[in-house]
Amino acid sequence: MKRRDFIKTSAIGLAAPSAVFGKTKIKTNKNNPIILSTWDHGLPANEAGLISFQNGGNAMDAAEAGARIPEADITITTVGFGGLPDKQGNVTLDACVMDSTGNAGSVAFLQNIKHPVSVARKVMEETKHVMLVGEGARQFALSQGFEEMDLLTDESKAAWEKWKKKQREMTPHETHDTISVLAQDKNGDLAGACTTSGWAYKMHGRVGDCPIIGAGLFVDNEIGCAAATGLGEEVIKTTGSFLVVELMRQGYDPTAACEEALNRVIKRHNGNPDFQIAYIAIRKDGKIGSACIKWSFEYALARGGVNKLYKIKGLL
């Protein structure tokens, strides 16, 4: 088994037409593709994923295609090209992907490459590794034909220079809107992608949950998939996306699984965390779920020919 393959945690075969959740047997959703993404920039991401499906793409193709849209949008300051830099003025990017077979790839602290999500997929498909970081990730990207470019836009540079004058500590909910994309194709197979420029004006070298398999993203094709957005440090400490999927395995529906994963974070912070985390999830039968800790959260859902933005209230 290759290192990037994850040990299956159920005895049910991948080819099985249905999966067991607790004591309930639920059939696989087929011929009804789904794309579920975080935030309002999930709408154009979903559109790209739908086009991928129309062109014969699978769940992994759709998730990658979706994530590439905000990565290339210079008006989005939390992802890819145009992302706000770290304290030293460097735009550093994190991303990961995971497919229906349990394979995964990720890059962290990547600089000067516009589409880290596609580099992460190359790591998954072309190497024996799961994660490449920093200069090694950049060199690998160049070897795979990716173009090197300056990702710091004039707008992001101006914002950074203004911030430098006071150097106020930024909170993650002010500047951090990771784009996570989950997809289920017509065969019922699941995949996901996650990409971000991270916490604005972070310490140089900081890596959040986004590129960490099991934290920012997890896919188990027998059960479901989940992804996160928000304060990555707290998602990492609770292996949040993995937890959501495992709760679905135990019989929780997707929303209840997201809520329970967040309740564990809330408990660790004495019932009143001062940050935001949100989860999205798709169960194998096509049921979706989401939840957030505080304030509100928006997710975009494309299904049955409709691509729509939904808003939910926080648990607190």
Image (cartoon, helix red, strand yellow):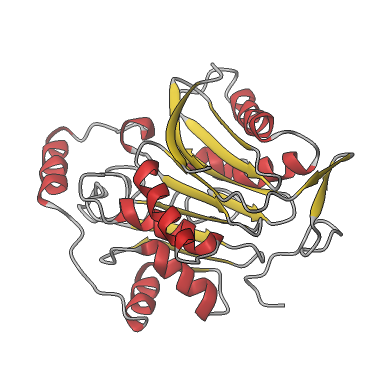
Residue furthest to the bottom in view is 143
Q: Residue at x 36, y 75 (%)?
A: 141
Residue at 62% across / 67% down in the picture? 103
Q: Quadrant of residue 100?
A: bottom right
Q: Residue at x 37, y 31 (%)?
A: 173
**Where residue 112 sits in the image (x, y, percent)?**
25, 66
Of the pair 186 and 65, the residue shown nearer to us: 186
- Classify 231 as above or below 10: above
Give the total number of marks visible in the rendering: 0
Quadrant location, the C terminus: top right
Using the image as rendered, state which of residue 199 and residue 25 is in the foreground: 25
Image x and y of residue 148, in percent:
23, 72
Is residue 189 depicted above or below 274 in this figure?
below
Q: Is residue 20 above or below residue 171?
A: below
Looking at the image, which residue sits at the far right? 23
Q: With respect to residue 142, does 197 lie above or below? A: above
Instruction: Measuring from the top left, give residue 9's x and y in whole percent.
Output: 79, 57
Seen at 38% across and 54% down, the residue is: 48
The percent coordinates of residue 77 (x first, y second) are 25, 44
Which quarter of the image is occupied by the N terminus? bottom right
Does the image show residue 311? Answer: yes
